[in-house]
Amino acid sequence: MKIKFLGAAGTVTGSSYVLTSGSGQSILIDLGMFQGTPDVEKLNYEHYECDPRQFLGMVLTHAHLDHCGRLPILFPKGFQGNIFMTAPTKDLTEISLLDAAKIAKDDRKQALFDEDLALRAIQQFKTVQYHETFQIGDFSIKMLDAGHILGSTSLEIVDSHPNSEVRRIVFSGDLGNTPEPLQRPTEYFETADAVVMESTYGDRLHPKLNAVDAVQSEMNTIEKTGGALLIPAFSLERTQELLHMIKHLKLEGKVSAQTQIYMDSPMAQKATSVYLNHPEVLNDHIQKELEADNPFEFPGLVIVRRADESREIREIAGPKVIIAGSGMMVGGRIVGHAAHFLPIASTRLLVVGYQGEGTLGRALHEGAKKVTINSQPISVQATISDTQALSSHADQGQLVTWLKSIQGTKKVFLTHGDDIPRKALAAKITQDLGIADVTMPTLNQEVSF
């Protein structure tokens, strides 16, 4: 068996792997966008190091763009196989790809693909159930729930070719910060010869804080000052978690029933419908709520659909919460709100997720007092705060616990992380689990077992 690392090797984004069996048959696992600094993003447009005509098929772990955002480029290059994923991932990936094509067109950016190519990719989507074994050539594949976002998976892949010394390899995908507010717990594998695992937070532990308390505190503050609370949030999972939290804060009287909450993200609106359509993969708490009510709806919630409605929010007096994408403030409606509200001292901005290097979100999180938005200098008078309690990625302890459950592991590859977290996690794995062979692959590196 061989594996080639075509992304997320030394970076957090761009996940993509080619797995080749003992007989030479190949499949692709993920094909995500590189996101972050200009130097990282330019990797999206460089020569793809494999011939997609050789792939018998593809498996997608989940619907975040850094895992699915380059799928459509396969088809002009001759790929003809099916793309396997869970049903929720199928619905969310359709939204993600079509939204990415629209944004590239509207922003007049160099587009990786257009709507027609996105639709071409969508035609090849095939759904499978958790725990269901399916076959692509030599490979027998099973998906478990990664507990990261709706429909996310970890993969167990067995090479049935009789000459293969390494028979069973596990791909973590992105592992969730279990227990999650909406998702079922992360599931564990029993055995593997080799493991490819993410390392986004491989050098740290999440603080033992309650995210609900952080959101309540921020809302209580703007209710006193009459200011705006900006929350840049990913459209998939993070927005739905925030809506669910705020609903309970209002029901319990911990925040004012009159405070207006603006969900200013067309993509998040579509994604929320997908969550409602797939209650079977949500946790027991949310399923119970769904029997009585919509867990993402409450008095004071305003769904903002048009761009002109988004701009009008800025003229509305009184305290308000604006939840908008993108989560790292690299585009979307949150950028316009930031340009307007950041120079106002009563504004608060709450960071609720990972902020990639080189992004506006990272600059604000690190305390920048001047930023540039749409080529205009912006003075930052707003208060910036954060909560890591809402992270949807496992921390170092959770990563080691997940790996410890897999018996027989001889080799570990650490991906989907910057080098500092990868090195820290590698040392921790060797120290705690006694696995000496821990590799940090580089971009386009191929390893034979």
Image (cartoon, rainbow, N blue to C red):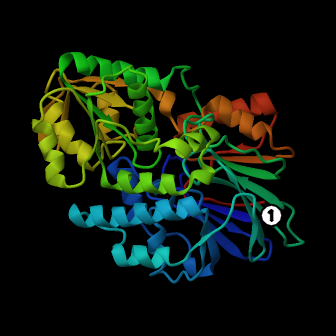
Look at 45% across and 66% down and name the residue there: 94
Circle 1 crowding by C-alpha within 10 Å: few under 14, some 14–19, many from 20: many
Q: Quadrant of residue 41?
A: bottom left
- The x and y percentages for residue 52 are 56, 77
Look at 25% across and 67% down and name the residue there: 105
Q: Is residue 81 visible?
A: yes
- The x and y percentages for residue 439 are 68, 46
The residue lying furthest to the right in this view is 162
Name the residue beneath numbered marker 1.
158
Task: Work out whether residue 300 or residue 191 is closer to the camera in this orientation and state it.
Answer: 300
Task: Work out whether residue 163 or residue 320 is closer to the camera in this orientation and state it.
Answer: 320
- The x and y percentages for residue 362 are 35, 35
Q: Quadrant of the C terminus?
A: bottom right
Q: Quadrant of residue 405?
A: top right
Q: Is residue 417 visible?
A: no
388 vs 6: above or below: above
* 91 left or right, relative to 431: left
* 40 left or right, relative to 86: left
Task: Work out whether residue 173 or residue 94 is closer to the camera in this orientation and state it.
Answer: 94
72 vs 412: above or below: below
- The x and y percentages for residue 316 are 12, 35
